[in-house]
Structure formats: C-alpha cells, structure tokens
Image (cartoon, rainbow, N blue to C red):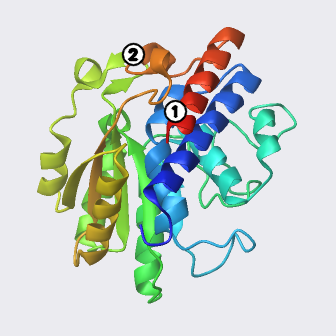
Amino acid sequence: MDSVTRRELQLTAANVRLGILEEVYSASSGHPGGSLSIADVITYLYFSEMRVRTEEPEWADRDRFVLSKGHTCPALYAVLAEKGFFPKEDLKTFRHVDSYLQGHPDKKHIPGVDMSSGSLGQGISAACGMALAGKLQNKSFRVYTVLGDGESQEGQVWEAAMFAAHYKLDNLCAVLDFNGLQIDGKITDVMNPTPLDDKFRAFGWHVIVIDGHNFDEIEAAFAEARTVSGKPTLILSKSVKGKGVSFMENQAGWHGKAPNASEYEQGVNELRAYMASL
C-alpha cells in the first residue's frame, strides 16, 4: 500500500458501506448483504490496484472491472462515487424510476462501469473476452471481475473458467466472494459447489485464498496475481455477508432486503463508531 495507507482504505471502505446502506434504504429495495461483503475488495481495487481515470472513464488503456454478481451494484456505485466518477448525492436515487443508477450495472449510462451485468455467469464470461482482446491487441491493461459463491453454481462460470485457462489469460484476475450464503440459505445446502479452490485449480487457474476483509492479505493477493504467467488467477475471498452491520452479518435474510428507518440508523451509527475508532 505505497500510496494509500491501511487506515485510509479502512475509512474509504466504511464510507462505501455507508453508501450501500443509503442506496438500499433510499430505494426500499436492493441487495445489502453481498454488497457489504465485497466492499473491502472493491475499495482496494479502485483505490490502490487498478489504473483508471475518473476524468476519462473510457480511457483505452485503463484496467477493466466487471461485477459479475451484478445485483451487488450498491457496492460498485458507492466505490465509483467515492472515487469521483459521479456525485455521491446521486446514490440516494438508486433504483428510482428516473435514475441512471439502476438495479444492475449499466455501461451505457453510468460513468466508470465497464460492463452491464446481472445475469449470473455472464460477467466473468465478458471479462474473459476483454482479457483475450487485450492479449490479441498487445495491450497492457488487466481485467478484474468479482463473482459470487452462489453464482459458481451456474454452468457458464465453468465454461468461462475453462476458456480463461485454455487461452492462458494471465491478465485476468477473478475474485470469488465466498460468504457462504445466497438468497435461499447456505450455498452448501442449496447446491454445494465446494471445494471451489480445488475446482479452479483443476480448471488450470492459479488460486489464492484470503480473508476478504484483511487489507494486508488483499494487497498481497493482487500483488501475487500480477506475477503469474500463463494462467488466470482466482482470489478466493472468504468474507462475511453483511460485513460491518452487526444485525446483517451472516444472515441470508439480508441478501435482498432493505433496512427500515431504525435499522438504517443503527447501521449508520455502527459504521460511524467504527470509523471513529480507527
């Protein structure tokens, strides 16, 4: 973390979590649980890892990011707003009829979004295409994608995994958010996809397992991914669904439910108390 300190990243991630709560509360809908679990990883990507230009969102040599689990776009929008791609006050318009901040990422209307996504499995597939295009064009940009552990139950994910290894896409780094829960409960009860680390290794990927809320481990993982040659990298990020808001943590019920006024206030107070303690 040469240019950004751990404390700065922690504060930024907390602000991202505040943005997530504001979005789903203002919309009275959305997906807070999985958004909160990826807040640290996405914060690190945009504030320490990726080459992007807020003043030039379509910069040809930028690193690309695809949110494969597109329903957790509150996290992406909050990060993009923190980074300065659009005004933070616009987060309050999330999912409103006349808002450009739709319920899934929309490349056409949202500055900083590299791929419209939402149908599970398609995001990582698009990221593979971007990475291959970069290879064919001798470009130096890297492609990053975040997918969900429940999403790994989709067959298209494994077609993409096979594709990425076959074409030796070492400019592709996927993060699998392993919080163990999906809308219907534990992923191992719904349709057990584990062991995901061994499966991706068997498909020809370089695999790194981390605590998805530890910035030292996050930093080390992305640094290691940049050294890998001849194969794509998967970072298996062990995380907590609803991280940062006590009553949402490890609760499948908060996969796709918005807080009421008192719950919103409690979550905001908890995050602000955490920020004050840093």
Residue 264 rendering spot, x and y as whole percentages? 66, 18
Horizontal side of 148 relative to 39 (left or right) equals left
Q: Residue at x 41, y 75 (%)?
A: 132
User: Upstream in the sequence, badge 2 or badge 1?
Assistant: 2
Q: Nearer the viewer, residue 159 or 231?
A: 231
Residue 107 rendering spot, x and y as whole percentages? 68, 56
Horizontal side of 142 relative to 17 (left or right) equals left
* Residue furthest bottom in the image: 138
Residue 71 rendering spot, x and y as whole percentages? 56, 36
Circle 1: element type: helix
Amino acid type, callout 2:
Asp
Q: Residue at x 65, y 45 (%)?
A: 78
Amino acid type, callout 1:
Tyr
Q: Residues within 10 Å of mark 2 (few under 14, many from 20)?
A: few
Residue 258 in sight here: yes
Residue 154 rendering spot, x and y as whole percentages? 34, 38
* Residue furthest right in the image: 98
Can you say which quadrant of the picture contains the N terminus?
bottom left
